[in-house]
Image (cartoon, grey):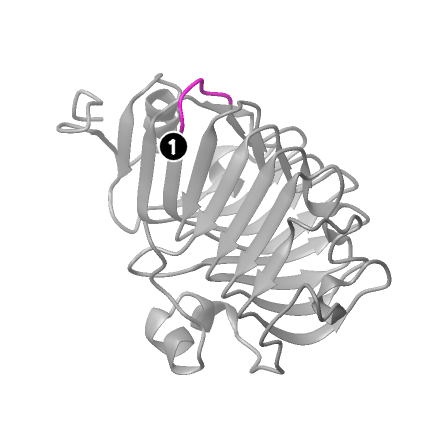
């Protein structure tokens, strides 16, 4: 690991052990060597431990985490300051708890991060006691191809905002009460889920989204005309295409939201 962890001289890491040390440093700036891949079948075959994310900014530069199994919280964003986490791919993830857990009243930003092949248990995939912003960056959008086995994609209080985000869902719910506010902007949603939102709120908004083969059995805001605009059938998107900004732009899925 090199660097001092400041914004001008961030920690540069290429091993999982150094990554954990760096992100657990309060207020640190952390960058992963571009296109690093960590296979948890070798790193933590018995299950990944919880990582307390205290850093101010974490840039994966295309880092891939694969074959992760977590019995407890995987990334615990417990910092007293806001954190930006960007440019990661998490694939083939088996979670009996949550992947991202936010337990501060700060606003956290997740950019250019893709989760695919995720199997979530009865707990929630995302839980928040702070404000969560998911958005694209200049290279790619956020994406979630998730099978929630009886759980929820996200849950908890305060607000969630998703911009330029792909949802490929199978089972579970998108979001539940008591979320104060949920906003979907320029998102693509396909698949099958229990409900889109289990609690309708005048503050929840869906704009400029594309929905394909969405089957919801509860409160389905995608079918609620006073909550939605520009809902159309779309084109199925593969995992590789989901990472291709040029392709997503060509089918009308905007990439490059404000950062």
- Residue 85 lies, with reference to residue 210, above or below; the image says above
- Compared with 185, 121 (above or below) is above
Q: Is residue 185 left or right of residue 158?
A: left
In the current view of this chain or complex, which residue is farthest to the right? 217
SS for tag 1? helix
| Front in this rendered view, residue 145 or 165 | 165
Q: Position of residue 181 (x, y in %)?
A: 63, 44
Q: Is residue 55 left or right of residue 189?
A: left
Q: How many C-alpha atoms fall within 10 Å of the one at disc 1: few (<14), some, or many (≥20)?
A: some
Classify residue 94 by image quadrant: top right
Report which residue position mark 1 lands on.
16
Q: Residue at x 61, y 31 (%)?
A: 46
The residue segment tinted magenta is: 78-83
Residue 203 is situated, as x and y percent measured from the top left of the image, at 64, 48
Q: Position of residue 233 (x, y in %)?
A: 62, 83
Above or below: residue 98 compared with residue 169: above
């Amino acid at each position: 690991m090199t660097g001092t962890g400041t914004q001008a001289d961030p920690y540069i890491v290429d091993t999982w052990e150094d990554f954990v040390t760096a992100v657990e440093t309060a207020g640190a700036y952390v960058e992963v060597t571009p296109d690093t891949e960590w296979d948890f079948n070798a790193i933590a075959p018995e299950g990944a431990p919880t990582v307390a994310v205290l850093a101010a900014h974490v840039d994966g530069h295309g880092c891939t985490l694969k074959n992760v199994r977590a019995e407890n919280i995987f990334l615990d964003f417990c910092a007293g300051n806001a954190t930006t986490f960007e440019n990661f791919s998490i694939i083939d993830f088996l979670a009996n708890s949550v992947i991202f857990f936010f337990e501060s009243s700060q606003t956290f930003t997740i950019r250019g991060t893709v989760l695919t092949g995720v199997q979530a248990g009865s707990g929630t995939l995302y839980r928040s006691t702070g404000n969560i912003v998911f958005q694209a960056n200049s290279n790619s959008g956020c994406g979630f191809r998730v099978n929630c086995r009886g759980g929820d994609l996200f849950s908890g209080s305060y607000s969630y905002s998703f911009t330029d985000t792909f949802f490929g869902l199978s089972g579970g719910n998108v979001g539940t009460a008591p979320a104060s506010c949920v906003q979907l902007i320029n998102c693509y949603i396909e698949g099958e889920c229990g409900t889109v939102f289990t609690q309708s709120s005048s503050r929840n908004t869906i704009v400029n989204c594309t929905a394909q083969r969405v089957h919801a059995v509860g409160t389905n805001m995608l079918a609620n005309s006073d909550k939605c605009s520009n809902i159309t059938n779309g084109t199925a998107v593969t995992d590789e295409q989901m990472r291709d900004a040029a392709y997503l732009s060509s089918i009308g899925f905007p990439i490059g939201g404000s950062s």
